Image: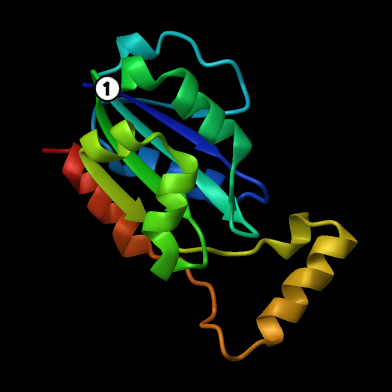
Amino acid sequence: MKTLIVYGSKYGYTESCAGKLKDMIKGEVTVANAKDKIRNVEEYDNVLIGGSIYMTMPNKHVKAFAQKKTKVLLGKKVGLFLCCGGVDKFDEFLAKTFPAEIIESAHAKECFGGKMNKENMSGFHKKIVEMVEQDKSQPPMQCLEENIEKLAAKFNL
């Protein structure tokens, strides 16, 4: 089985999740950044697509890839994942990121949680994150490693 993992990452967390996913999936696995030109999607049996949600907005490269490749993706075994702190808004974020027909036909969908890699941020974004982290009414962002494992397991059958 050939699997393609396409990801879009703002500060590196989604990229690291795509790497973990690659290590867990059996067979030949290719990882590609959605902002790069991705060719030959037709050659893969499985396509997993994931992106970050930043300030409630989806990664524009992942959204564009999914829209551009919808017809090809509908003929594949597709998995969708998002990296976001708003786990309770996962379905809303899926709808903002992927065409409805891809969501409906997806073999699996998972939220991998979120992590803000402040070391990769500009000063302005770092300050915003620090302010958000001080808001104790919101649960802290965390990696949902078990969901990465669940998605991989669904493609290892």
Disc 1 crowd, CA 10 A, few/some/many (<14, 14-19, 20+): some
Compared with 7, 40 (above or below) is above
* Dot 1 amino acid type: Leu
Image-quadrant location for residue 80: top left
Camera-nearest residue between 89 and 49: 89
Which residue appears at 49% of the width and 67% of the height?
A: 86
Find numbered disc 1 in the image and state the secondary structure of the residue it sits on.
loop
Q: Coloring scheme of the render?
A: rainbow
Q: Is residue 65 visible?
A: yes
Place of residue 53 in the rendered image (x, y in percent of width and height, measured from the top left): 56, 53
Q: Residue furthest left?
A: 157
Place of residue 83 in the rendered image (x, y in percent of width and height, measured from the top left): 49, 55
**Relative to 37, is 29 on the left or the right?**
left
**Relative to 46, is 111 on the left or the right?**
right
Place of residue 110 in the rendered image (x, y in percent of width and height, measured from the top left): 32, 53
Which residue appears at 33% of the width and 10% of the height?
A: 42
Q: Residue furthest right?
A: 123
Quadrant occupied by the C terminus: top left
Which residue appears at 62% of the width and 27% of the height?
A: 35
Q: Residue furthest bottom?
A: 136
Image-quadrant location for residue 101: top left
Compared with 103, 1 (above or below) is above
Place of residue 70 in the rendered image (x, y in percent of width and height, measured from the top left): 38, 21
Quadrant occupied by the N terminus: top left
Compared with 83, 34 (above or below) is above
Which residue, given by chain and number where applicable, does mark 1 sit on? Answer: 74
**Relative to 80, is 143 on the left or the right?**
right
Which residue appears at 32% of the width and 10% of the height?
A: 43
Q: Is residue 112 visible?
A: no
